[in-house]
Each structure stands twice: as C-alpha cells, then as structure tokens.
C-alpha cells in the first residue's frame, strides 16, 4: 500500500494520542503496516500536541511540510497552524469547536477568524470537512469524547482502507471499559457527521 | 499483569519506543534498574517502576543520574544484568562515574540508555551523546525503529556481557516517542542474587591500577571494533555507485527517499547501528567502488569525520559530503523532505518537492506556550517573591515545571543552564554585583544537585536567598518520587527526607517553611529573609495539583468566581498571577470554575475582595 500520511493536531487534554493509538491498532488489525510518533511538549500544561501516523510501507516516523494526505484538526486554530503540512492533494477534517489559547482568554491576544481562514484553506486543498466535535461529544455523553468523534470522522471519510467495524472493535478493546459506550456513540456520530456535514 | 510481561514470543504488540526498550531489557533478563527521570527517556523507567511492584525486578528512582549509574554499576559488579536510563544531559551528570567505570569494566551487564533530544522539544541543549563513545571508549548502539529498539536493547546486554563493559544505547526523541508494532521475543530469566569477588587491584582505580586498566580498556575497544565491523547492525544495502551513510531515524528518511525517487539501484546505503567503535573495515568495503558519499546524520558530524578518517587511512580520495550550507545542518531534527531535498541536490537528481498550500494569507495563530497549571503553588510563590523584590533582584532558576515562571506576568527567571545551577551560580551573581539574588530550585532538583552548591555557599559565606519550590513530586516528567516523597499510599516503604532538616544540616542559619497559598504570610517570610545577611532558605511547600488529584482521598476544594457587582476591574489577578482559570469576557475577568482548584491566591490579592466561593448548590447547577 502506498504511504498514507495522517497528521493529527490538538490541544493538550483533547486525547489525540489515544485517537492515534486506536487508529494504529485498527491498522494493525487490518494487516496494514504503520508507524507513528507524537510530540507533546508539556501537554498537560496547555501546549500543542501533534501525532503523525504513517500507514503503508516505509520506515520514516515523520511528516514534512506539504506532505500530509490528511490533516485531522481537533481545534480550528490548530488546523490553521498546521496548514503548511497540506498540499493541494490533502484532505482536511477539522472540528470547529474553539479552545482559545490562554493569552486570548486573558484578552492579551486575538483569536483568529477561523471561519474565514478555514474557508480560505478549503480553496487550496482537495477537500475540507468541518464538524463540531465538542457538541457531538456532548451528545454522545461526554465532552472528553471529542477525540472519538474526530476518529469517527476520519474513519467515515472513506480515505483509509480500514473498516468501521475494525475501529469499533479497537475502541471496545483498547479504550477504558467505563468509557467504551460513550466512545462508541461518539465514534458513530463522527462517522455520520462526516458524511452529512458541509464539505467546503 | 503488566503488558510488557506478556510471555508470547512471536506475538506483535503496539508499543512506544520507550516501552520497546523496557521490553528488550526484560527479554535480556534485566534484574536491576535505576533512573532519574528526564524527557524523552522517562517512560522506560515508568515501566520498570510498575513491573518492579509485581515481580522481583529491582528498580529505584535514584536522586540523580550519577547515583542511578553507580547503583547499577554496583549491582553489575556482582554479576547482575542492570540498566540505567537517562536523558542526554543526564549523561553529563553521570559522566564522572562512567569514564572510570569503563576502566574497571563490569561483570554481569550494564546498559546505559542515553536519550538525545534534537530540536530540544523539552531540553536545554541538543548535545550529541555519540561523542561520549569516543570520550569513554564504550560501545554505542543506535536503533532506527521501535521494533529495533527492543532488539538492540537485547543485543546491548549481550555485548555488555561479552565485553564486560557498560554499553550505551543512544536514542533520539523520534524513537523514544514513536510507536509501532514490536515482535516480542522470549522473556529472559532474571538472576537477582549477585556475588561479589574482591579484586581491589582491578577495581580500585588508584593511579597504579588505572595505568594497568587503561591498556585493558584499549584491548576491549579493539575487540569491540572487530564486533562492530562484523555486526549486522552495520549493514550495507544496495550496490550503486553513490553512497549514503545514515543512522537512527535518518535511515528511515533515506530509505523512503530512495524508494520515492525510484533510485534504489543507483545507491548503496550503509546503516550504522553500532556507531562506536566505528566499523572502519565495513566502511572500507562500503567506500570501495563508491564515487561519492553523503552522510545523513542528525546532530554533529560524528560519522562524517569518522568516514573521512577511514578514507584517509585507506588512501581513498572520493568526495565525502555531510554537514554544510547547502547540505545537512547540525541543528534540530531532520524531516523526510529535508533528507530527500539534500539527496537530490547532492547527486543532481530531478525532484519536485510537494508544494505546501499558501499560508501567508491565513491569519496568524497565537502561540500556546505551556503555562503553570491552575492551582500551581509555584505561581503563588513567584507572585510573593515578586511582591518584595520586583525586578530588583537577580533570579537564577533551575530545571522543572517552575522554569515556566519565566513567562509574563511573573518574569521570574534570569539564568538557566543545568540542574542545580541556580544555587550554584547565585553566589557568582551576588559577589559580582552586590545585588540581591534569589535562586529558585524545585524539590526533586534540590535532591538531584542542590545539596552541594548549598553547602559550598554556606561555607564560603555567600549572601543570597534560595527558594525551594517544594510541590512534593517530580512534576515536569510525570510525578516520579524523589527522596522527599512519601509512598505509603502505594504500600511502598520509603524514608522521606525533610528538606528543612537537610538545609539546616548543611548549616543554613535562616530557614522558613511556608504554605505559599497563604499569600501574605509568604510575602512576610520573604521580607524577613531579605533582611538576613548570608545564605537563607525559603521552603515553599504545597502539593502539585496534578499529582494531588491522583492521590487517595483527594477531594476537589471549593472553587471561586468573580462577583461582577464587586469587581472594579483592577485586574491585579490577571496582572500579577495570570492563572489559566481566568478569562476575560466583555472586559471583565471571569473564572472558569471547571479549571479553578480553589487555591485562593487570587482571592487574597483582589483589592476589592470580589472573588468569592461558589456555593455547592451553584456548582451542581
């Protein structure tokens, strides 16, 4: 299989490392070789968390600028920050739920006009899908399940050669039992949203 | 049962690089391990800590890397298989012991993991640990993948046992924090009972002994060089006329680049996995028939220089490229595109790089600098010290979460280089300027390397204040215990050492311990200490809120909110302490009650007393 590169960006606490891990397990269960790496500089203290997942043959653990096939953004301003990873062939799936950086919350900095920026990004990539992961996660039963909504959106987008049921199995076996039900609902809401949401 | 104890050889498991290293050690039969935590190495020690609680593996968090290495060395001298794990700068701390341990050698086995951090994701420098191989004479192995991290750890133990020398397993962040499928090998048998045979004329490094031991080390290095030449870890792939030498993660980038450029038949690749002693005869074989060589290595030109040496020695005149303005940089991490671009330019190959979408029309996204957490006691201490000294004092600081005190509005941190160097440098600042100096140090760092500079300062009659930011844990790296931490809640019998007693024992005549969440009392204590001539110590003692949440019996404290009727927008709360639980809405400061921990520092500094408890009833709503 040709390498498919998936860049996941989020804010510390949004659970993207778990999402990447479930994606990896689902790839493994589908017999697809994969590699991944994470960067979490002081994530618990409000920093940015990045995961890079590479599916298919190959040996590198890293995604360079302009190289990603998919940019999965858990937070819209982080999606914009990571825009340089995309080329005209990239698919972008981003949540629209905002988590302003602390400096913005304190009124010392300005949160960008993400709506306009995302529209502008949409004109340069092959496909851009938006969804409100936090409200879907709340519908599923927990704001913490936004990562599973985003994973569902990725899984439901049809970009990856991994079946939805494989993801569901991995959520059942690899996430904490007390959250399995909520996680599965959140995942399904994500798969549903990606097929019915506005594609820019 | 811990997942790494799964005894199913041949089975595959998704592991983090650091978990793969711990697994490799278990497969090799590691019986004794010690560490001081440090990113990106910390998760290796975490596995050992957990596993030691359910097996007879001995593991300890030692006070610093030097102690952990010496601990492992002692056990290895008795024939045990041992490991010490540390980040790259930790090797500097352990280096004094390491250099002469190379002379005595060891029985059993000793593998030292040295985790480098190119790009300095969470480090103060990006030194290249491979030079320690040359400096000490010790063998170095470097994995290129997560699966190989497991395999090479096993090999490192074998090599250590064979040569009776410590072996360094050198990784980079992109291996430690990468994940991939690992094929499990059989678990090794642990031998936990050692035997020490006295041989003072071999082990006690007085000059007469060391003069005999140094040649013995040179013999071992020669044997190691022969192993390195024969090792499958140094392998040649392809037989083209153009050569690329690579190691660690750069091997993956090179391999992917040649495949994507469809150029595998034009190249030969030497992957160096056993990098000290350098495999000179393997290199000769590689260079023979090669027209041009490019060396792809992150960090320093370690291999490039070694290859130039080989070429000179073997009378070969081919061009050798590596670091250079249009080639590779010594700085930061590599990425696949950079490696592909340099290969294409060096060998004049057609290559059209992927074009990133235009980003100059996109708005600037504000940074997300990490910040002291809501309820962090360090913020309270910093605010109190700033209340007394403002910008007048010089603030040497140290390594830990509290380094974040550097950021506005606290601005507490004027000099930072190494663990313990806050106290160490304070006397220099104070003597050279005559200004007030306040040195900050965390509790874990205090035990790591704060004791000797403090003793030195007391003895030499220096004049400065030390603030020990005692949050009862090693916060930055994930809440590992240190010699001040009680572990009764884990049913672990440890003897916590009181920092106050330690400080007094070192002869400090003026010591005050405060709870920094009592803001005015803390300010008063700082004032009182500021009037003292000599070395004084403030111990600001209150738990890390992230750690406390994990302890049994934790209950969230009552949280607070701003009463809009009373708030007159002085914004002292934002201007002095800037807790991340604050946000500004319609010009007024509000508190996110989800994030508020109830530490009450803002309550105490609000001039209008406008920050009031949220009643339990309101919380429920």
Image (cartoon, grey):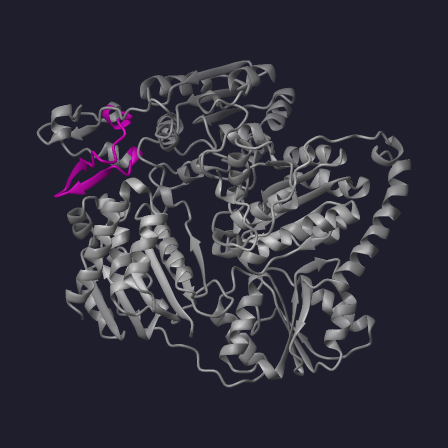
Quadrant in which residue A69 is drawn: bottom left
Q: Nearer the viewer, residue B561 or A92?
A: A92
On the rendered structure, is B162 left or right of A32? right
Q: Please provide percent x and percent y for residue B497.
A: 54, 19
Residue B225 on the magenta span? no
On the rendered structure, is B121 left or right of B507? left
Quadrant in which residue A143 is drawn: top left
The structure residue drawn at horizontal position 55% and vertical position 38%, both measured from the top left corner, is B48
Q: Please provide percent x and percent y for residue B278.
A: 74, 61
Q: Nearer the viewer, residue B137 or B274?
A: B274
Residue B20 visible, this orientation: yes
**Residue B521, relative to residue B38: is it above or below?**
above
Magenta extent:
B576-603
Please state, as top left, top right, bottom left or bottom right, where the C terminus of chain B lies in the image: top left
Residue B582 on the magenta span? yes
The structure residue drawn at horizontal position 74% and vertical position 54%, both measured from the top left corner, is B134
The structure residue drawn at horizontal position 72% and vertical position 32%, both measured from the top left corner, is B74
Number of numbered discs visible in the structure rendering: 0
On the rendered structure, is A176 left or right of B5? left
**Residue B458, relative to residue B114: is it above or below?**
above
Farthest residue to the left: give it: B565
On the rendered structure, is A68 left or right of B72? left
């Amino acid at each position: 299989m040709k390498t498919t590169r998936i860049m996941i960006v989020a804010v510390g606490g949004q659970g993207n490392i778990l999402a990447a891990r479930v994606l990896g397990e689902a790839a493994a269960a589908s017999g697809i070789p994969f590699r991944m790496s994470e960067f979490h500089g002081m994530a618990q203290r409000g920093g940015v968390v990045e995961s890079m997942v590479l599916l298919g043959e190959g040996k590198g653990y890293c995604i360079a600028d302009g190289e990603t096939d998919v940019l999965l953004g858990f937070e819209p301003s982080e999606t914009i920050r990571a825009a340089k990873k995309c080329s005209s062939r990239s698919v972008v799936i981003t949540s629209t739920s905002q988590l302003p950086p602390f400096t913005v919350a304190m009124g010392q900095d300005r949160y960008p006009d993400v709506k306009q920026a995302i529209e502008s990004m949409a004109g340069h990539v092959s496909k851009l899908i938006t969804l409100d992961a936090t409200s879907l996660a709340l519908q599923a039963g927990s704001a913490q399940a936004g990562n599973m909504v985003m994973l569902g959106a990725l899984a439901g987008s049809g970009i990856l050669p991994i079946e939805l049921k494989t993801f569901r199995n991995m959520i059942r076996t690899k996430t904490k039992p007390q959250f399995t039900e909520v996680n599965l609902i959140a995942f399904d809401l994500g798969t549903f949203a990606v097929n019915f949401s506005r594609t820019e | 049962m811990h997942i790494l104890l799964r005894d199913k050889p041949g089975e595959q498991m998704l592991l983090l690089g650091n978990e793969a290293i711990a697994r490799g050690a278990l497969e090799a039969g590691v019986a004794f391990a010690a560490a001081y935590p440090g990113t990106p190495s910390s998760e290796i020690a975490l596995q050992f800590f957990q596993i030691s609680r359910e097996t007879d593996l001995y593991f300890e968090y030692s006070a610093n890397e030097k102690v952990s290495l010496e601990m492992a060395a002692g056990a290895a001298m008795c024939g045990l298989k041992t490991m010490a794990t540390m980040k790259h700068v930790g090797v500097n701390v352990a280096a004094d012991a390491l250099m002469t341990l190379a002379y005595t050698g060891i029985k059993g086995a000793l593998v030292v993991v040295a985790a480098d951090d190119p790009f300095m994701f969470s480090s103060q420098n990006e030194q290249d640990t491979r030079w320690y191989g040359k400096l000490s004479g010790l063998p170095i192995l470097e994995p290129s993948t997560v699966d190989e991290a497991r395999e090479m750890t096993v090999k490192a133990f074998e090599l250590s046992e064979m040569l009776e020398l410590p072996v360094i397993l050198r990784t980079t962040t992109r291996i430690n924090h990468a994940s991939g499928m690992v094929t499990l090998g059989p678990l090794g048998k642990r031998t936990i009972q050692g035997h020490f045979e006295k041989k003072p004329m071999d082990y006690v490094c007085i000059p007469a002994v060391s003069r005999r031991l140094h040649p013995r080390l040179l013999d071992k290095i020669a044997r190691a060089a022969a192993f390195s030449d024969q090792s499958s870890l140094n392998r040649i792939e392809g037989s083209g006329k153009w050569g690329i030498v690579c190691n660690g993660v750069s091997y993956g980038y090179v391999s992917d680049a040649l495949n994507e450029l469809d150029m595998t038949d034009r190249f030969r690749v030497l992957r160096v996995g056993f990098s000290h002693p350098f495999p000179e005869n393997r290199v000769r074989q590689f260079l023979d028939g090669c027209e041009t060589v490019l060396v792809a290595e992150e960090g320093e030109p370690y291999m490039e220089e070694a290859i130039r040496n080989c070429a000179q020695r073997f009378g070969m005149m081919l061009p050798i490229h590596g670091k250079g303005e249009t080639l590779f940089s010594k700085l930061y991490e590599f990425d696949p595109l950079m490696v592909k671009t340099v290969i294409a330019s060096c060998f004049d190959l057609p290559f059209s790089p992927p074009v990133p979408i235009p980003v100059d029309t996109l708005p600037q996204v504000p940074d997300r600098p990490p910040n002291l957490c809501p309820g962090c006691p360090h913020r309270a201490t910093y605010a109190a010290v700033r209340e007394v000294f403002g910008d007048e004092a010089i603030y040497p600081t140290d390594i830990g979460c509290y380094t974040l005190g550097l950021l506005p509005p606290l601005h507490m941190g004027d000099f930072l280089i190494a663990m313990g160097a806050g106290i160490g440098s304070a006397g220099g600042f104070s003597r050279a300027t005559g200004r007030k100096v306040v040195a900050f140090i965390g509790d874990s760092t205090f035990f790591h390397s704060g004791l000797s500079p403090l003793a030195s300062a007391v003895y030499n009659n220096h004049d400065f204040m030390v603030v020990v930011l005692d949050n009862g844990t090693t916060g930055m790296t994930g809440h590992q215990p240190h010699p001040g931490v009680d572990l009764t809640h884990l049913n672990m019998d440890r003897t916590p050492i009181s920092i106050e007693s330690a400080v007094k024992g070192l002869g400090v005549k003026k010591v005050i311990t405060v709870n920094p969440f009592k803001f005015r009392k803390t300010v008063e204590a700082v004032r009182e200490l500021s009037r003292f001539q000599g070395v004084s110590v403030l111990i600001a003692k209150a738990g890390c809120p992230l750690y406390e949440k994990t302890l049994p019996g934790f209950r969230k404290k009552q949280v607070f909110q701003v009463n809009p009727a009373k708030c007159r927008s002085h914004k002292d709360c934002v201007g002095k302490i800037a807790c991340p639980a604050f946000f500004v809405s319609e010009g007024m400061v509000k508190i996110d009650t989800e994030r508020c921990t109830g530490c009450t520092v803002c309550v105490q500094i609000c001039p209008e007393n406008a920050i009031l408890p949220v009643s339990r009833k309101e919380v429920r709503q």
